[in-house]
Image (cartoon, rainbow, N blue to C red):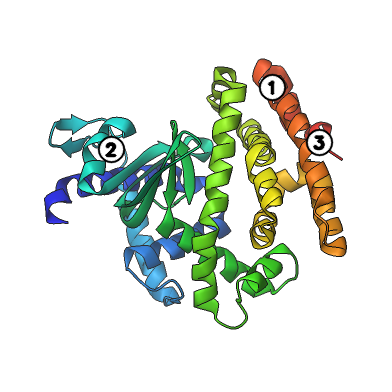
Amino acid sequence: MPAFAPILAAVQANCHLSDARHAQDLTLCNYLLAMREYFRWEHDLPLDAVPARAEVARWIAEREALWEGLAGSDWSPLPLGCGEMDPFDVGAVNAELVPQGLLYGAGRGRFGKPHFFLARLAGRDTREGVEVLEAGCEYARDIDAAPAVLQGGTIVLRREAFQRWLWLTVEAWDARTSEGPMAAALQAYGYANERARALARMADAERETLILHELGEHAAGRLLGEAWEALMAQAGDRRLEITARAVRDLLADTLVTLPTLVDRGAVPSLHFWFATFAGLRRELFPRLAAARGAWVESGSLEAIREAVEAGREHWLRVAGEMAADGETARRYALETGAIALS
């Protein structure tokens, strides 16, 4: 992309700076997995490529040396036709780039880590009054590529990032070869017979599940208002942030994602959703995990429907109480059992 070389360089420079400041936020295991996937992306390797450990280790050492040299650096402005732009002014940047077939992303993720990417614009749509922009081939990105985000009032879906996340997730599942929702989801897409094609079909179909979740995030944001954003802006309390993100995710999925999938009878997508239902979200909502078991045993989705309806009321109340009172939110974070829906 010769014509876009200056902005590409600026975006990647900001990606490096973000990684330099925040890569240590990852656990060692997650860091090494993320770096291996990042290596495959940067070297344009096939999704199923297994790079040599020595080569990846050498690249990691070089990248960490680059990060060390960025101490004291500041964010690079983006050079556009209208002048230099603030790298966090996503709307203004995309107003110039989208008509040229490019899509830019910037925002703050877990623990305040900034995320940036520059990609080919692969699709543009509107769902329930919300604009949906799809990124295709990515030209610049940081170590942590979220498959989908709600960026202001716009849903941004990153097709390539989702494909890579899916392969990484299934690689970890392959190492365990366990039963459960991921096994059922993979079976629904014919994974046992044609691995690559099955994952391609899953990545294409489950884009809809990602969009539904972000529509749920949008709906949750409208219900919770500015008080919730103020809660999320509180710096320094990681346990509070993790708990708040889990609560909002559960609210989003009980508002939109799960009711829609249940109404459609979207069995493969429900298996896929439950394959991602883990960690604190699962701990906080054991009734939903039990409802999946009832579904698998009986073939009826009624238990899931009932759990979702109860959960929607519960998580809206909990999120509202957290947003209204910071002390309540911190107590929930410290005593997560107090907000578990059993």
Provide the secondary structure element on which disc 3 rests: helix
Mark toward the viewer: 3 or 1: 3
Q: CA distance from mark 1 to mark 2?
A: 33 Å
Q: Position of residue 51 (x, y in %)?
A: 42, 75
Q: CA distance from mark 3 to mark 2?
A: 40 Å
Q: Which residue is mark 2?
A: 94
Q: Nearer the viewer, residue 104 or 333?
A: 104
Q: Nearer the viewer, residue 265 or 169?
A: 265
Q: Position of residue 203 (x, y in %)?
A: 51, 63
Q: Position of residue 256 (x, y in %)?
A: 63, 40
The residue drawn where x is 67% and y is 65% is 182
* Quadrant of the drawing holding the N terminus: bottom left
The numbered mark, 3 or 1, whose residue comes first in the sequence reads 3
What's the residue type where badge 2 is placed?
Answer: Asn
Q: Is residue 304 above or below residue 58?
A: above
Q: CA distance from mark 3 to mark 1?
A: 16 Å
* Quadrant of the drawing holding the C terminus: top right
Among the 4 quarters of the image, the one containing residue 198: bottom right
Provide the secondary structure element on which disc 2 rests: helix
What's the residue type where badge 1 is placed?
Answer: Gly
Q: Nearer the viewer, residue 313 or 86?
A: 313
The label shown at residue 310 is 3
Provide the secondary structure element on which disc 1 rests: helix
From where the camera sits, is residue 73 visible? no
Q: Which residue is mark 1?
A: 320
